[in-house]
Image (tube, coloured by chain):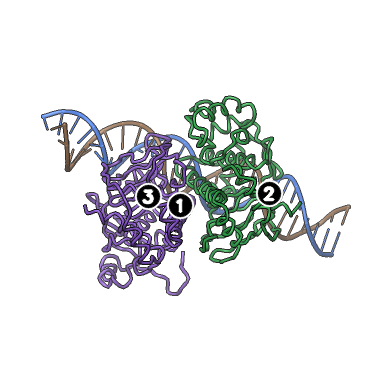
Chain colours: A purple, B green, C blue, D brown
Amino acid sequence: MQSGFAFSKLADRLASLIELSSADVDLLAGMPSTITHHASHDIVVRAGDRIPYCCLLLQGYLCWRSVDASDGQIISVHVPGDVPDLHTFQKLSSSAHLCTLGPAVIAQVPHVFLQEASKASPSMSQALHMLMLAETSALRNWVINLGSRDALTRVAHLVCEIAVRLRAVGLARDLRFSSPFTQADLGSACGISPVHANRVVQELRRKGLLQWESRNITITDWKALVHLAQFRHDYLWLREPAAVLPQHLNARQAHLDLAVAPERRMHPQNGTAAT
Amino acid sequence: MQSGFAFSKLADRLASLIELSSADVDLLAGMPSTITHHASHDIVVRAGDRIPYCCLLLQGYLCWRSVDASDGQIISVHVPGDVPDLHTFQKLSSSAHLCTLGPAVIAQVPHVFLQEASKASPSMSQALHMLMLAETSALRNWVINLGSRDALTRVAHLVCEIAVRLRAVGLARDLRFSSPFTQADLGSACGISPVHANRVVQELRRKGLLQWESRNITITDWKALVHLAQFRHDYLWLREPAAVLPQHLNARQAHLDLAVAPERRMHPQNGTAAT
DNA sequence: CGCACGGTTGACACGACTCAATTGCTGTGG
DNA sequence: CCACAGCAATTGAGTCGTGTCAACCGTGCG
């Protein structure tokens, strides 16, 4: 893995939120980092630990999970380009574990660098701030999800969110992405039991919305999935709608929709989103 | 109420998180603000609105609630001293409504002032940052609550959290506080139906944990309530354990806190919340 | 080869939702 | 002063979603 890789992941992610000047990119290019590899379901940062760096996720998935039970509740899920522990960079430790879901590659970025960069460039400071705010916003949305939707909708929503976040950093362009999550993980994330998670996945498959096999998810009916999940991407604060929705690039996707499930293609005739 | 003292509410709240210098307090004393009064279940800031000030809650309760349905999911609850929309002060609007729960008094604090203050004093900047982080931490905890606990425990947890947060700013010293929440509100906050919220409240009463009548809550068995809710105050990041727990628990608790981690409280729970 | 793990399935229990009706309270107008 | 409306709290009955338990299967790996 080349050394330039790490900073560009972060640059891409920040650029998905806010316009970066070339000076900012140059600043990021000087980012020091230590690359680490982690196995599946590994604890990357243990609850309560204080470390002098932040974790920039390069490949795979990370999540925060509560320490509580054997298989703690998953609090948030992160995709490449995210810095899940950005909020610890001021000084604090967290009361949850930062864990991998599936194998992952991480760049450890010293707090010092982030502080210096923030100090050096107001726009960089703002970009990092936005990154934190965006994760908080996703968290709020997750509260809504857990508090007001049923199991099927929650899972659909999670899949939508992951897909969109992956697309925002240039992954999952064809709505296909790896899913190293076990069904137990899925359950922990959505607040349902593993057994029920299984049934929900089957239901999504049965409805023709997605395929989920051998650690891969392929969304086969994006519009229907979004509709079922009542998913709106706006809370992610991504700048580029084109990167968000498979609108135009999906002439192929569109006819795929038609081919797979024509009758399910109920879309709002007008602007107002129907329930 | 002495409306000239809006700043002191904020100062108290910030001081509950981090030590403020007298210079910082002086800075806050110059805080301009417009005091507004609101009726129960009023929308203070509508979703999508961009306003040039933050809302410092002086009296009553505020909450974020999603726009979705008729009676949207409550995302977070706020007590006096909080600035629920602090995260919008960079530039962004929110996609949820900021609403009152019961009548409330608010001080509108111009973004400009907060920006200047942050610029003028690093510790002030850090304090405001901590305030945001603390709210995010509470949000994370709420995800755990919704995702992994049953209705009874969720409600108990909410009551514990509100009590502790009130105590941190000098209210509810005797574990008694006003609760203008309707049972429908309670349901929206905990992700349960209003009818079930009622049954849960009755159950808590029946167990002798609290009284809840005529818009007032009195916690009658704090230890049992904390135990039932598996509540730990540490995620609120309050500096002063004495403000957190009722007296009879404080002796050993405070001792533990100081002994283990004076800066950041990540204590191994043994006394209060043993399962 | 056999074990462990993740996925799958069925039966059953229970928590929570919905519907619907009643009570009690508070404010308002006749 | 009472009648009434409106709102919140309460209650009961029936249903449904989800959890739990327990088993079984397929696969990968030691």
Within 10 Å of the Cα at label 1, are there few (<14), some (14-19), or many (20+) other Cα atoms?
many
**Residue A130 x/y as whole percent:** 45, 58
Residue A77, numbered circle: 3
**Residue B118 x/y as whole percent:** 56, 55
Please, what is the three-letter code of the amino acid marked with disc 3?
Val
**Residue A94 x/y as whole percent:** 44, 41
Q: Is residue A237 left or right of residue B101?
A: left
Q: Using the rendered image of the protein, determine whether residue B247 is visible from the camera's viewpoint.
A: yes
Host chain of mark 1: A
Q: Earlier in the sequence, mark 3 or mark 1?
A: 3
Total numbered labels? 3
- Name the element at disc 1: helix
The quarter of the displayed image where residue A44 is located: top left
Report the residue marked by disc 1: A139
Please, what is the three-letter code of the amino acid marked with disc 2?
Ser
- Name the element at disc 2: helix
Report the residue marked by disc 2: B8
Of circles 1 and 2, the one toward us is: 2
The residues bearing labels 1 and 2 have C-alpha atoms spaced at a distance of: 30 Å
Please, what is the three-letter code of the amino acid marked with disc 1?
Leu
Name the one closer to the observer, D15 or A180. A180
The residues bearing labels 3 and 1 have C-alpha atoms spaced at a distance of: 10 Å
